[in-house]
Image: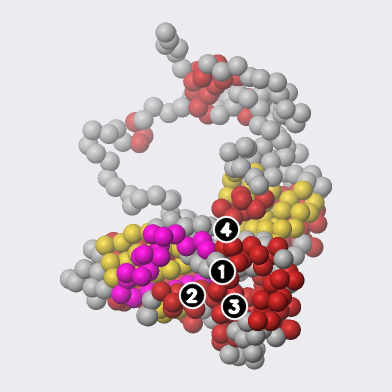
């Protein structure tokens, strides 16, 4: 077997400003470059780095399931790898975040004995943290694809921030040729679900990172109940800030040798048993060892 | 007429120029005039609307009258009625010295909250 090499890289959201030195070098040194970008400028820019850039955009078609499209993309990318060539596959954003074709191409390349690697890049989530000025360490953050969030109900956790991806594409398995939300009914349903856990007036953010250096992100701060009326597009994310501060688990605090300080205004006044982590319950139930 | 794509690409490779463009629209307009961009092209770029800019560049690059292919997205395929494989590396057989999963000591059963405690209405 002829051993090829596949490097999967991301160009960030705002190429070429977001492209790492490492990714640019991988592109420049590849023998073949494939490109999947939401921004029409990216292939033009790539052509300044490499003479042999092929877009896989033509494999998308309205009405064709994304599974079919992804399969075609993966096989096109792997073609020259199987002939022993060094291939770079460039995706927008981070190549490993919401990017099935990149992961699948890597998996198959490795399974077939080829050299394969993925390089990190800047994702829409990274842009969101910077543009909204939020730090995920403050309350923690839970992140889901919007359709998946609805299909597999999770316990609500208003004490953590919530990030929902692709709220404009809920339950959409193909592509559509419009810049507004592809499934407004799905957004209405999502709103109803969130209103079970958050108040109507909880301020949420509909966010789109900017793919161009000459303009800023789209940021719409709205009350949750107004979400169905928000300017949502295929690239929109929904950021739901934490509504309350998680209460301190006193058992765990003692186990860690920590003393709780004054509570914040919205923190719960007591720690209900259901709020204790399984770990702390196990700790409380376990026989204690002497500590020095 | 100048090229939107060429202009935006040039600005996008120069963070200082991009910053000047956003902060000083009048200067940006003068520079766009020097680049040969039409009034209509200037309005598009000054709109601060990424979707509008993307469509205009796409039309120019694809040289089509109709809108270019829309933005595409690459979320993991969702199979609503099939179980999803757990994330992580491929499943490997446990080493012989590891106890099988059903012999691992389970955590104590979780205490059940009293009626009305910890529930959300």
Mark 2 and mark 3: Cα distance apart in space: 12 Å
Who is closer to the viewer here, B37 or A145?
B37
Name the residue carrying label 4: A124
Residue located at (35% from left, 36% from top):
B101
Residues rendered magenta in the picture: A17-40
Mark 1 and mark 3: Cα distance apart in space: 9 Å
Q: In the rendering, which numbered label is found on residue A83?
A: none
Name the residue carrying label 1: B12
Q: Any magenta on residue B69?
A: no
**Horizontal and vertical percent for residue A52?**
37, 80
Disc 3: host chain: B
Disc 4: host chain: A
Q: Is residue A193 above or below residue A229?
A: above
Residue located at (34% from left, 31% from top):
B103
Callout 1: few (<14), some (14-19), or many (20+) C-alpha neighbours within 10 Å? many
Mark 1 and mark 2: Cα distance apart in space: 10 Å
Q: In the rendering, which numbered label is found on residue A45?
A: 2
SS for dot 3: helix
Choose mark 2 or mark 3, whichever is in front: 3
**Horizontal and vertical percent for residue A150?**
63, 55
Q: Are marks 2 and 4 on the same chain?
A: yes
Residue sitting farthest toward the left: A1
Upstream in sequence: badge 2 or badge 4: 2
Upstream in sequence: badge 1 or badge 3: 3
| Discs 2, 3 touching: Cβ within 8 Å | no
Q: Quadrant of residue B63?
A: bottom right
| Res. B59 in view | no
Choose mark 2 or mark 4, whichever is in front: 2
Name the residue carrying label 3: B7
Callout 2: few (<14), some (14-19), or many (20+) C-alpha neighbours within 10 Å? some
């Amino acid at each position: 077997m002829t051993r090829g090499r596949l490097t999967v890289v991301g160009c960030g959201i705002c190429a070429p400003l977001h492209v790492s030195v490492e990714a640019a070098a991988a592109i420049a040194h590849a023998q073949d470059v494939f490109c999947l970008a939401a921004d029409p400028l990216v292939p033009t820019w790539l052509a300044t780095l490499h003479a042999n850039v092929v877009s896989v955009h033509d494999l998308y078609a309205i009405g064709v399931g994304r599974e079919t499209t992804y399969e075609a993309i993966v096989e096109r990318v792997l073609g020259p790898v199987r002939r022993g060539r060094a291939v770079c596959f460039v995706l927008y954003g981070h190549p490993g975040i919401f990017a099935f074709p990149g992961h699948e191409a890597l998996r198959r390349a490795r399974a077939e004995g080829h050299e394969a690697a993925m390089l990190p890049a800047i994702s829409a989530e990274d842009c969101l943290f910077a543009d909204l000025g939020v730090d995920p360490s403050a309350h923690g953050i839970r992140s889901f694809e919007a359709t998946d969030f609805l299909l597999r109900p999770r316990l609500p956790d208003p004490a953590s921030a919530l990030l929902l991806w692709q709220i404009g594409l809920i339950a959409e398995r193909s592509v559509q040729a419009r810049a507004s939300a592809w499934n407004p009914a799905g957004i209405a349903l999502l709103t109803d679900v969130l209103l079970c856990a958050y108040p109507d007036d909880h301020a949420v953010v509909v966010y789109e990172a900017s793919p161009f250096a000459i303009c800023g992100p789209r940021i719409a701060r709205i009350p949750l109940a107004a979400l169905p009326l928000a300017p949502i597009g295929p690239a929109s994310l929904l950021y739901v800030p934490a509504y309350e501060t998680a209460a301190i688990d006193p058992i765990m605090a003692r186990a860690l040798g920590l003393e709780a300080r004054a509570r914040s205004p919205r923190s719960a006044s007591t720690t209900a048993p259901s709020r204790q982590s399984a770990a702390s319950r196990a700790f409380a139930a376990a026989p204690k060892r002497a500590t020095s | 007429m100048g090229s939107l794509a060429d202009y935006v690409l040039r600005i996008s490779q120069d963070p200082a120029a991009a910053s000047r463009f956003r902060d000083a629209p009048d200067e940006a307009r003068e520079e766009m005039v020097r680049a040969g961009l039409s009034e209509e092209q200037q309005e598009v770029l000054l709109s601060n609307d990424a979707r509008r800019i993307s469509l205009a560049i796409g039309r120019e690059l694809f040289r089509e009258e109709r809108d270019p292919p829309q933005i595409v997205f690459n979320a993991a395929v969702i199979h609503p009625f099939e179980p999803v494989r757990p994330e992580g590396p491929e499943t490997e057989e446990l080493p012989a010295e590891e106890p099988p999963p059903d012999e691992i000591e389970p955590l104590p059963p979780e205490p059940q909250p009293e009626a009305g405690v910890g529930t959300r209405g």
